Image: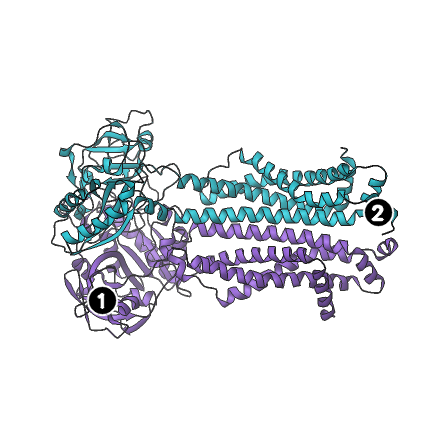
Chain colours: A purple, B cyan
Amino acid sequence: MFGYYMDLALRSLRRSPVLTALMVLAIAVGIGASMTTLTVMHLLSGDPLPGRSQHIFYPQVDPTSRLNPHSQPYDMMDYHSAVDLWSAQRADRQALITVSALRLTAPTVHQPALMAQMLSTTSDFFPMFAVPFQYGNAWTAQDDARHARVAVISSDLNNKLFQGSDSVGRTLWLKDADVRIVGVLAPWRPSPQFYEVVGGRFSDGDTASFYGRPEDVFMPFFSSLEVNDGGFNPFTCWNAPDPGVKLQNSPCVWVALWVQLDSAAKVSGYRDYLASYAEQQKALGRFARADNTRMFDLMQWLDFNRVVPSDVRLQTWLAFAFLAICLFNTIGLLLAKFLRRAGEIGVRRALGASRAAVFAQCLVEAATIGLLGGLGGLLLTLLGLWLIRRQPVEYAELIHLDPSMFGLTFALAIAASLLAGVLPALRASRIAPALQLKTL
Amino acid sequence: MILRPILSSLTRHKLTVMLLMLQVALTCGIVCNVAFMIEERIARMSAPSGVAEDEVVLIDSVQVDPHTNPQMRHLEDVAALRAIPGVRSAVAVDAVPFNGSDWTSSLNTQPDSDANAASASVYNGTPGELQTLGLNLIAGRDFLPGEYLPLDSAHDGAGLGKVSTVIVTRALADKLFPAGNALGKSVYPFSQPARIVGIVDHLSRPGPHDAGAEDYSALFPLLPDTAEVTYVMRTAARNRKHVLEIAKATLTRLDGNRIVRQPSTFAQLRADYFHRDRTMVGLLLAAAVALAFVTAVAIAGLAHFWVGQRRRTIGIRRAIGATRGDILRYFQTENFLIVSGGVVLGLLLAMMLNLILMQQYEVPRLPVYYLPIGAAVLWLLGQLAVLGPALRAAAVPPVVATRSM
């Protein structure tokens, strides 16, 4: 029966080729636009640490020394608060984070000096964020404590300087210091670069930079402060820093802290600890407010910073609105088309076809349009993604069509056209045969 | 023309008419908002930066040797750049509009109080920044040579706490002192007052900011002393490429131990900065046109079917005296009624969508004049789409009435 309906559908579609082409085109464009934007949304809004993100938290305190009308704590912490909280070791894992740029040369490698981005962090960073290693290992907590001059480098930098060979044990010249490589990362490209997301609410929706590449050099936090002394920049300051005072003692925020808390009890325990720390600092006269602490988990923090660029969200809405209009279009045209064939349907009904049979026949025709539209939509999706990859935005190289999106394209196309076909098919199946036969 | 017969015929196709109305409504609602977004983006892209855009070129330099004194380096570099034939003036600055290096500071009108504060982008540079960028000073004066201090970037720009004078944009002056008497008043970047000695017409900020705050900029007489600095040169438009090449060679010759990067004209900088907006304008435009096209196809397709369905009735009407014009007008009026229904719904939808967008994306309120324009566009679109089928209907000969099929 299905084969027969298919044959009828193809005949009917061939009878008005222009109209068929327009319906298929409308579905294809609607599906292509929706799937392109949905793929980008999917890739940009995904969980960068699937299965672990619910245990990763971002504590915040308000270190300002005068009463601040800002109702929210700063996006980063001052040196003292961050180091106090880190040293307390109250979480299962904890990592300090700050970023700077410095000059990098590799002795024995004949390449010009380059400005490298350096992530200053502590040893827990690598296991906490499941960072993959190609050669060697992360440094240890002892290395943190004794300010060891060691570094982990990215696979990009390893390819650039050492042609991808095992460079563990070799030396890098960072600014004026000799630093030994202890580990080389495997290619690692979290989307977004979640551990560094700050200040999203001030970026006016232009958050593409959160999808950049991880740094090339990772160094123990405290030794990096010595190596790149003066090379760090504050996120913001609440008072003018006094001349001659190091950034560590200045009224500025520039260090972030991430903690891993493996159970709900530990989470509430850590919240209490944050509150008691703020109380204690207020008693010492360092904080003006003790009640301004906060701790988001990783996904909440990304949401709070609205990491998905507003343009991408807008494009997705627009694409689905477009798909909706294409659907209305298809419903209207199919309805007109089926009802115009009222005579033919009347004859089929009179010859014994049931309502269900007529309904099924109409739906097969609608699904055929959907399938053709889905094929066109897939091609347009590939074209759309190719166009996005050519855009000069940070996330361009992350964009690809994955198998689940490939399947979803067809599912969406057929579902959309079936949805569009149901109403017209229902109407067509309720055509009274006698009335139609009379007019023949 | 009497509407009764048209209306009664439409009530026999309730479902189809409703679907078409809904489609017109959705299109109207979306296209109005998309058009508004396009206008907004274009307004942002074409806002004056205040800079003499056709005459300014820039080049970045990053000092590699940590033992060089950056301020001495800048002095020597600027002197050499000024000596390039064709360069009218040159300065070292820490930021220019659209280069993304945005240092935002809160400026208060009273010491130690955040009341009446505005958040503004801070521009620092060597003497001559105003002429080199081509800023239009509309009141007051430029900085005096004695007013310049080092930025003290080693201590996070502590110079900003000591500076005694400032030049602000008109927008920032009006924001801080709405009474319009900003000149001579003091602002407080931190606890020290800085007197407003000059007001410039426009100076866009280095990065994106909320609508209305794009021009909140303040120039301070602070000399950059960071290893990374931007050299700005002013020259005749036709010399720009040439000057950039010489400037790059000059900087490398003066000190090879540095990274010279991103030599570009201001026009290029602007084009790169607004690339995202240009792409969005293109996308929005394509979406609006595609939506209008799909809706036009729906209208034309449906009219086409109806003409086919009504051939006999049209023939009878023609046979009993209706002219071709009558038939044409019948279809046009019918279309006008359907589109009008859709437009009424669509204008409501446009306002609702705008309310949602206002919450989600901080889009301003849709200006009222978009509504009549949107309605007119859809009426026109409907009439154009129906014209083909209506003409075909008008061409149906009366003799059809006498045939059985």
Q: Write down the residue under mark 1.
A: A151
Amino acid at circle 1:
Ala
Indicate the position of residue B320 as horizontal and vertical percent values.
86, 38
Q: Which mark is residue A332?
A: none
Q: Which mark is residue B400?
A: 2
For label 2, the crowd category at 10 Å Cα-Cα, with few meaning under 14, some 14 to 19 and many 20 or more, is some
Residue B24: which quarter of the image?
top right
Q: Quick check: A436 above or below B98?
A: below
Residue at 56 percent across and 51 percent down: it is: A322
- Label 2: chain? B
The reply to whether label 1 and label 2 mark residues of one chain is no
Amino acid at circle 2:
Val
- Quarter occupied by the C terminus of chain A: bottom right
Q: Nearer the viewer, residue B102 or A126?
A: B102
Q: Is residue B254 in view?
A: yes
Mark 1 and mark 2: span between their CA atoms?
90 Å
For label 1, the crowd category at 10 Å Cα-Cα, with few meaning under 14, some 14 to 19 and many 20 or more, is many
- Label 1: chain? A
SS class, disc 1 = strand
Indicate the position of residue B84 as horizontal and vertical percent values.
18, 44
Indicate the position of residue A120 as horizontal and vertical percent values.
24, 60
Q: Nearer the viewer, residue B115 or B28?
A: B28
Q: Is residue A42 in view?
A: no
SS class, disc 2 = helix
Indicate the position of residue A190 as horizontal and vertical percent values.
37, 63
Q: Quick check: B176 above or below B401?
A: above
Q: Nearer the viewer, residue B63 or A305?
A: B63
Q: Nearer the viewer, residue B348 or A265?
A: B348
